[in-house]
Image: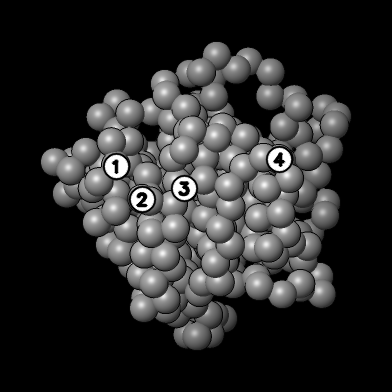
Amino acid sequence: MSDLTKRTVFITGGSRGIGRAIALACATQGANVVIAAKSDKPHPKLPGTIHTVADEIREAGGQALPLVLDVRDEGRVKACIDEAGHHFGGIDALVNNAGAIRLTGVENLKASRYDLMHQVNARAVFVCSQAALPWLKESDQAHILSLSPPLNLDTRWFAQYGPYTTTKYAMTMLSMGMAEEFRSYRVAVNTLWPKTLIATAAIEFEVGGPKMMAQGRKPEIMADAAVSILGRHADRMTGQTLIDEDVLRADGVTDFEPYRYQPGDKPLMPDLFLE
């Protein structure tokens, strides 16, 4: 496994939660980090902006470039990726972390919300990957990593919130296709998903609240797994749907207690789409 020294990692939705954790973890491994997200100004409820994360990276001795980006805007996506590529002299990895969630079935979901989930989840993987590809072709350690689940076709994952499920599965299917399409360019394409619920603002405000967060792990477990994947040579791992804990176990990690959001022996909740 190689490190990320002087590699440039472009992270969508990098201002909070898992995206922020991945940004900081990449920076500690020597990467130049592009934090691309909508959060240019402080949010009344949610901590963090692209600028505060950039400051954290710089304080730790890393190089950061904060860029305002709505992944629904394909023109802005291309502009940001090109700006990052010119600023750092290339792009070595794209992390498709930006996401939208609403766990509701078809009957009660507004079409506008479905459009949002489709655009921020599935469509953004297409748009961002397409824009980044010319830069990734020039890297000798190129990766596209999308935060989406393995494909589990048990109908229970469709029965209650099929709209969300289909947008997340579309991310994975696009990734599987790109892994083969981009193989000749030596661009690795994989997905990463948590084994357990991850305590983030999405869980607190969109899903189950603070009580559910207590049954989860910190975003740092996903960050450590992402760094492990991005540090590998592209021809060693591509076309895989990976689980955070499995990645870290393969690296020799055996103690996962430090990743708990709240210390204790309360059973952790498996994440969606996993048995």
The foreground one among 128 and 174 is 128
Task: Give coordinates of residue 34: x percent, y percent.
Answer: 52, 55
Q: Could you tell which of marks 3 and 1 lies nearer the N-terminus? A: 3
Position of 9 relative to 52 (above/below): above
Could you tell me if residue 80 is visible in this image?
A: yes
Cα separation between marks 1 and 2: 7 Å
> Mark 3 Cα within 10 Å, few/some/many (few <14, many 20+)?
many
Position of 8 relative to 1 (above/below): below
Residue contact at pointers 1 and 2, CB within 8 angstroms? yes
Looking at the picture, which amino acid does disc 3 mark? Answer: Val
> Mark 2 Cα within 10 Å, few/some/many (few <14, many 20+)?
many
Which numbered circle lies on residue 70? none
Badge 1 is on which residue?
Answer: 139
Badge 2 is on which residue?
Answer: 90
Cα separation between marks 1 and 4: 25 Å
Q: Could you tell which of marks 1 and 4 lies nearer the N-terminus? A: 4
Q: Could you tell which of marks 3 and 2 lies nearer the N-terminus? A: 3
Task: Give coordinates of residue 33: x percent, y percent.
Answer: 53, 49
Cα separation between marks 3 and 1: 12 Å
Cα separation between marks 2 and 4: 22 Å
Which quarter of the figure has residue 52?
Answer: bottom right
Looking at the picture, which amino acid does disc 1 mark? Answer: Ser
Which quarter of the figure has residue 201?
Answer: bottom right
Task: Give coordinates of residue 127: x percent, y percent.
Answer: 33, 67
Please tell me which residue is depicted at 32% across the width and 36% down the height of the picture.
141
Badge 4 is on which residue?
Answer: 60
